[in-house]
Image: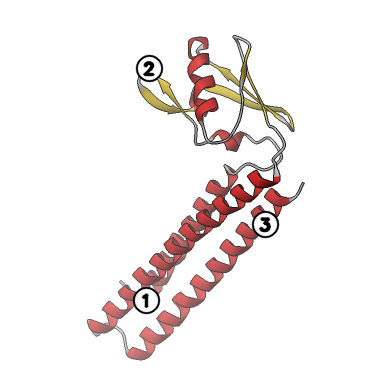
Amino acid sequence: MTVKEIETSAKQRMEKVLADLQHAMSSVRTGRASINMLDGIRIDYYGTPTPLSQVATLLVPEPGLLTAQPWDVSQIGAIEKAIRTSDLGLNPQNDGKIIRIPIPPLTQDRRKDMVKQLHHMAEDHRVALRNVRRDANEAAKKLLKEKTISEDDEKRALAEIQKVTDGAMAKLDAAAAAKEKEVLSL
């Protein structure tokens, strides 16, 4: 393995961490209805935990409303129960064919809870970025130990890895700050 391969691998892994953060943050509720809010909900579909999006058509007909139309109408009760028992604080309404999920406006306390949740998500992803950096640094030090590269090359590699990490951390912080602002805005 070369220094360039280590750096490329670290960059790719850090991009994956940032993409995962974006996906995780998309499920955090803001004032508007979003299909992504329901990503974490699993339905007991004939004994198999199945994502809601795989058993129903999800739509956002208006900013304060989501609808879930099950493909198998016999599952409507299970879908309604799964949404009700989720930690999203939603109260679905079932008319026998379609489930309407009104999105109530967020209270200030709920917004603060969501910001805390965002901070935890961001910190978990910061730890993941640091782990990627540690792995890359260890790989560079291993090359030095094996005498594949010189000490100067190792120092340059460590500096480059740190530069990549700093850039990824800046992107992470910016994304978290933007989502926090979105959650807190009325």
Q: Residue at x 64, y 44 (%)?
A: 110
- Secondary structure of residue under mark 3: helix
Q: Amino acid at mark 1?
A: Val
Query: Going by the image, does 182 lie left or right of 134?
Result: right
Judge by depth and name the residue closer to the eye, 186 or 153. Answer: 186
Q: Residue at x 71, y 40 (%)?
A: 31
Q: Amino acid at mark 3?
A: Ala
Reply above or below: 46 against 176. above
Residue at mark 2 = 46
- Between disc 1 and disc 3, whose residue precedes? 1
Residue at mark 3 = 178
Residue at mark 1 = 3
Q: Residue at x 65, y 59 (%)?
A: 177
- Between disc 3 and disc 2, whose residue precedes? 2
Please state, as top left, top right, bottom left or bottom right, where the N terminus lies in the image: bottom left
Picture coordinates of residue 178, whole percent (x, y): 67, 57
